[in-house]
Image: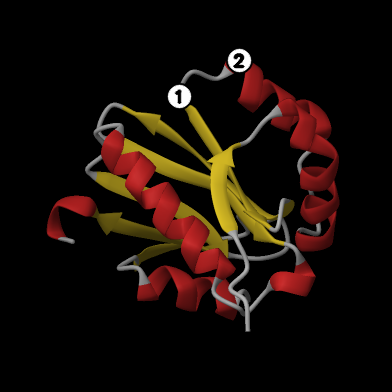
Amino acid sequence: MKQKETLIEPMDIKDINKIMFIEHQSYPNPWSIYLFLTEIKNNKHAEYLVLRQEGEIIAYGGMWVIFEEAHITNLAVDPVFRNKGNGDILLKALIQKARDRGAKFISLEVRVSNSYAIKLYKNNGFIVEEIKKYYYGNEDAYLMTVNLEQR
C-alpha cells in the first residue's frame, strides 16, 4: 500500500475556504474569516500551519508566540481525517515551531468534553493546570500547559 504524501506548510490566504470549512465542521462557535485573515496577514506573533495530504488541506492549527511563551489558539482536523494521527502530526509541528521561535512554555484551552483533544494534548506532555469556568459560554475549559524545557 502506497504511503500518502503529508506536508506541513504555513497557512496562506488561498487556503482560507478550506480552513473555514474545517472550522465550521469542528467548532460550535467558529472563528470568522476576518479573524483568520487578520491572523495570517497582520499578527507578527502568529504562526499558522496547514497539514496537507495528497495536496488537500486536512487540518490546520495556529498559535501566538510572544517572547518565551506560546499559546495555541486553534487546532482542527477535517472530520473525515480524524483519529488517524493527523492531529498529533500537526501538534508536534506547532510544538517544534514554538521551540524554533524561542518558546519555553505552551498553553491552550480545551473544552472539558473534548476527550479526544485532551488525550492528544496529554500524550504530548500537556498537563491540566486549572479549570476555567464557563470559558466557552455554556461549557468549562481546561487550561493545559507544557514546559518545553522539561520535554
Instruction: Give me the residue at 22% from left, 54% from top.
Output: 147
Q: Which mark is residue 42?
A: 2
Instruction: Give me the residue at 34% from left, 65% from top.
Output: 126
Nearest to the observer: residue 35 or residue 83: 83
Which amino acid type is shown beneath numbered disc 1? His
Q: Residue 76, position in %: x, y? A: 66, 58
Which amino acid type is shown beneath numbered disc 2? Asn
**Quick one: SS at disc 2?**
helix
Quadrant in the picture for residue 40: top right
Query: Crowding at label 2, few (<14), some or many (≥20) Cα neighbours within 10 Å?
Result: few
User: Horizontally, is 138 left or right of 42 in the view?
Assistant: right
**Which residue is situated farthest in the front direction here?**
2
Nearest to the observer: residue 110 or residue 62: 62
Task: Say if mark 2 contacts mark 1, CB within 8 Å.
Answer: no
User: Horizontally, is 126 left or right of 102 in the view?
Assistant: right
On screen, 119 above or below 51?
Answer: below
Q: Which residue bears the numbered disc 1?
A: 45
Q: Which mark is residue 33?
A: none
Nearest to the observer: residue 14 or residue 94: 14
Distance of mark 2 from mark 1, alpha carbons?
9 Å
**Quick one: SS at disc 1?**
loop
Q: Residue 60, position in %: x, y? A: 63, 50
Q: For the C terminus, which image quadrant? A: bottom left
**Which residue is situated farthest in the left direction here?**
150
On screen, 138 above or below 115?
Answer: above
Instruction: Give me the residue at 57% from left, 67% from top.
Output: 86
Q: Residue 18, position in %: x, y? A: 82, 46
Instruction: Give me the residue at 22% from left, 43% from top.
Output: 104
Quadrant in the picture for residue 4: bottom right
